Amino acid sequence: MIIGIMGKSGSGKSTITNLLNEKGNYLLIDVDKVNHKLIENTSLKKDIIIRYPETLENGKINRQKLGMILYQDKKKMDEYNKLVWLYLEKKLDEMIKNTTKIVILDWMMLPLTKYYNMCDIKILVESSLAIRLERIKKRDKVDEIHFFERDKNSVDYKIEDFDFVINNDKGIDKNEIENIGKHIALCKRKK
């Protein structure tokens, strides 16, 4: 079983994922974190440095610099996504195949991939722009320009496509998370 948790940057996807995991024994896949590890992979890292040498600092790729380059040029973003996707898809397929646990995919870009249609349960986490901006500035230590460049490249979601929609403007309702956990357990039993 695969559960997809989606929402724009700063909406609270990871918080919801971690709360759900308090009630279950899931394989949590934060796809952005998997991607961050992959871009330090030797062959992928070399490919990125060849294309974007200005992002290399102290032997590591500066992801904020890379992000600003990509957010401002759709052609470069598409090129980068194709490059990384070869590595990321292989890694995700391997992680999903090699577990007997329920998988939770925490990923803003999920609707743009094959994994979206593989989800048995889809959860959307929403928060207002102002709240997301404050969270991202604090969490990622970026300025408003970086946030808005990142945000303009995010996905527009259709609420009717989701089994659950969680509004995270005023914090998370633990009863709502508990009910979602019960729903997941029921769906697992039916399979």
Image (cartoon, rainbow, N blue to C red):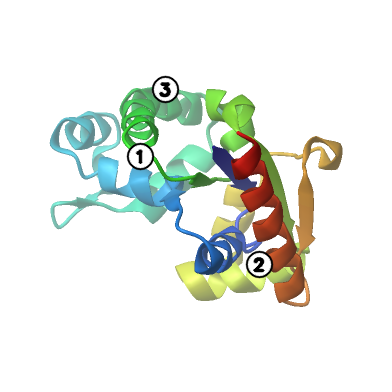
Query: How far is disc 2 from disc 3 in space, using C-alphas?
Result: 28 Å
Nearest the viewer among 73 and 116 is: 116
User: For mark 2, does the 10 Å Cα neighbourhood hold few (<14), some (14 to 19), or many (20 or more) residues?
Assistant: many
The residue lying at 51 percent from left, 24 percent from top is 75
Q: Amino acid at mark 1?
A: Thr
Element at label 3: helix
Picture mark count: 3
Mark 1 highlights which residue? Answer: 99
Q: Amino acid at mark 2?
A: Leu
For this view, does 137 lie left or right of residue 177? left
Query: How far is disc 3 from disc 1 in space, using C-alphas?
Result: 26 Å
Q: Mark 1 or mark 3, which is nearer the start of the sequence? A: 3
The residue lying at 83 percent from left, 42 percent from top is 159
> In the figure, residue 191 lies in which quadrant?
top right
Q: Which mark is residue 82?
A: 3
Give the x, y percent position of residue 144: 61, 65
Query: How far is disc 2 from disc 1 in space, using C-alphas?
Result: 35 Å
User: For mark 3, does the 10 Å Cα neighbourhood hold few (<14), some (14 to 19), or many (20 or more) residues?
Assistant: few
CB-based contact (under 8 Å), mark 3 and mark 1: no
Q: Is residue 172 visible?
A: no
Element at label 1: loop
Give the x, y percent position of residue 155: 68, 39
The residue lying at 70 percent from left, 74 percent from top is 174
Mark 2 highlights which residue? Answer: 133
Indicate whether 190 appears above or below 24: above
Indicate whether 116 appears above or below 131: above
Judged from this view, the residue extending furthest toward the front is 189
Nearest the viewer among 43 and 159 is: 159
Q: Mark 1 or mark 2, which is nearer the start of the sequence? A: 1
